Image (cartoon, helix red, strand yellow):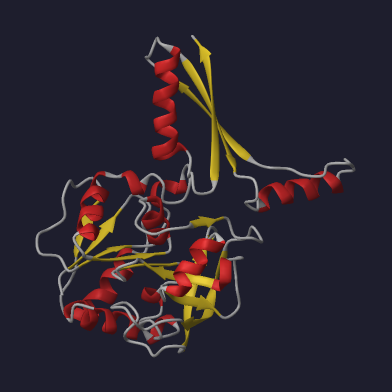
Amino acid sequence: MKARVYVTLKNGVLDPQGEAVRHALGSLGFEGVTGVRQGKVMDLDLEASDAAAAEADVAKMCEKLLANTVIEDYRIEILGA
Amino acid sequence: MKAAVIVFPGSNCDRDMAVGLERATGRAPQMVWHKDASLPEGLDLVAIPGGFSFGDYLRCGAIAARAPIMRSVVDFAARGGHVLGVCNGFQVLIEAGLLPGALMRNAQLKYVCKVTPLRVATNDSAFTCGYTRNQRIDIPIAHHDGNYLAEPALLDRLRGEDRIAFTYEQNPNGSTADIAGILSENRRILGMMPHPERANDPALGGTDGAPFFAGLAEGVMAGA
């Protein structure tokens, strides 16, 4: 089973890297980009066969290591085999 | 004072930290590898040095904070032991949950490496008792992720409890309220981005870090 974890900065937390990307897009002529938020995607290969159990496990992993929940949110997708 | 310095793969200020502690205490600290399961007996201080532990992978300090030795460090802190984290060590202490808040990428996105003026915001701790309150000192900084983030409620608490140890005179990284270092609730854990161990010898361009170590040696033994 595979799981995909998205880790993004919480709303309201300033994202200077996203801002830098937004400025660079503007300087390339892409107009109308009013905001960029940068985050991380992690793909996990899991031995688990039960999707609900896998998701619960990955949520624990996010809380303990994959995300810093002081400043980051996470979202989990179970992708199947 | 009996001290230990934790060494992670990628630590690069561990030896400077050891020199600073040895000069102040007359006793070489024990160097403890991150894979060790326990700390030496009878320690008074654990220091987590600067560097790029585990290549700053995932988040600065995140992997180091989950290294085997850190369980013992957390236990040591819970028993009232003194713990010092400098630069990457500060990031490790936050990731380990020993200090509140977060350290984000510098606001201007640049790695900053320079001597920077600091204000000693409190001298009420073993770490800062070698200075006078409001003393201005010059200490080097060298970091990419030192932008300390404190929510308003946390900032109020840090201020109300006199837990802001050092502030920047010229904010180099976007830190909330110019914060350069903070103390734990029991004042026995200090995390700071500036490097006192790099300002501890005239040959290195400054000695404003020397009172930090001298005060620390006295303060820890006095039970501050």
Instruction: Give the residue drawn at x 39%, y 90%.
Output: B132
The answer to whether any part of residue B147 appears in the image is no
Residue A72: image x %, image y %? 54, 43
Residue in the picture at 65% in, 41% down: A38
Q: Position of residue A78 (x, y in %)?
A: 51, 17
Q: Quadrant of the N terminus of chain B?
A: bottom left
A37 lies left or right of B49: right
Quarter residue A49 falls in: top left
Give x and y (percent) for residue B175: 57, 66
B101 relative to A53, above or below:
below
Residue drawn at x 77%, y 46% as measured from the top left: A22
Q: Is residue A37 left or right of residue B81?
A: right
Choose top left, top right, bottom left or bottom right for residue B219.
Answer: bottom left
Residue B54, position as x, y percentages in the image: 40, 46
Name the quarter where the C terminus of chain B is drawn: bottom left
Q: Quadrant of residue B104?
A: bottom right
Residue in the foreground of this view, choosing between B48 and B201: B48
- Is residue A5 positioned above or below A65 on the image? above
Q: Give the number of callouts.
A: 0
Is residue B22 toward the left or the right of residue B179 in the image?
left
In the foreground, B163 or B82: B163
User: Is there any visible trace of residue B91 in the rendered image?
Assistant: yes
Q: Residue at x 35, y 51 (%)?
A: B96
Residue closer to the observer: B33 or B107: B107
Q: Nearer the viewer, residue B101 or B212?
A: B101
> Would you place residue A75 above or below residue A64 in this image?
above
